Image (spheres, helix red, strand yellow):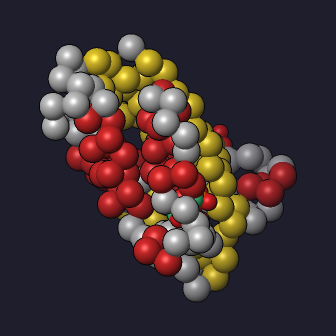
Amino acid sequence: MRIGIGFDVHRLVTGRRLVLGGVEMASEVGLEGHSDADVILHAAMDAVLGALALGDIGHFFPNTDPLFKDADSVLLAEEVARVMSQQGYRIGNMDVMVMAEKPKLAPYVSAMRARMAGVFNCPVGDVGIKATTMEGLGFVGREEGIAAQAVVLLEETGKAGLK
Ligand SMILES: Nc1ccn([C@@H]2O[C@H](COP(=O)(O)O)[C@@H](O)[C@H]2O)c(=O)n1
Ligand SMILES: C[C@@]1(CO)OP(=O)(O)OP(=O)(O)OC[C@H]1O
């Protein structure tokens, strides 16, 4: 078994879609980034890569590479899941904490968990997503950005390098 941690923050701006956990949310503001700035998937990807001691998403998907401009983070996460499988690991479970003053994530959490489970090839019961406000404090409280933290446990498949 191996454990990994990931964290990501992106700035909220007008004129961008808000996509979290691979699900587009109704919002007047969205997250700015080189890709679609999906902080949930970015934190989860970094946790998986961290568990494998393979570096971070910036190493795999440089934010200077036009290939990843406005990239769908689902596609990036599918590549990370492929690497994980190739290294002989599968998700044991993952847990994500989102810090967002608004919008409310609760109505979208089921869809996000299902999307993440599909991307990382695991049962939906192995994906936890929770949200909290920052009670008006700090950059999240001022609605300047959204942050996410992820912890992932990986289990060995016994099939390293076979895929
Ligand atoms: N962006 C968010 C923030 C919070 N929630 C849900 O509301 C509950 C209460 O949040 P507090 O910050 O006041 O503790 C929280 O436990 C979540 O269920 C949310 O859905 N989206
Ligand atoms: C996802 C990547 C893709 O170019 O760009 P950003 O959307 O800017 O996101 P970040 O969390 O800064 O991670 C770096 C990159 O891997």
54 sits to left or right of 10: left
The answer to whether residue 64 is above or below residue 113 is below
- Residue plotted at (41% across, 61% down): 73
**Which quadrant holds residue 5?**
top right
- Residue plotted at (84% across, 52% down): 138
Residue 141: give x, y in percent of width and height.
Answer: 77, 55
- Residue plotted at (49% across, 78% down): 66
Specify the quadrant that holds the C terminus. Answer: top left
Can the viewer see residue 155?
yes
Specify the quadrant that holds the N terminus. Answer: top left
The answer to whether residue 11 is above or below residue 123 is below
Instruction: Looking at this view, name the residue that lies furthest to the front.
Output: 161
Q: Toward the viewer: 19 or 157?
A: 157
What is the tally of numbered marks visible in this picture? 0
74 sits to left or right of 158: right
Residue 12: give x, y in percent of width and height.
Answer: 66, 70
Residue 156: give x, y in percent of width and height.
Answer: 28, 18
Instruction: Looking at this view, name the residue that lies furthest to the right.
Output: 138
Can the viewer see residue 130?
no
15 sits to left or right of 45: right
Instruction: Looking at this view, name the residue that lies furthest to the top.
Output: 1
Residue 98: give x, y in percent of width and height.
Answer: 58, 45
Task: Write down which quadrant ligand 2 falls in.
Answer: bottom right
The answer to whether residue 65 is above or below residue 55 is below
- Residue plotted at (33% across, 35% down): 84
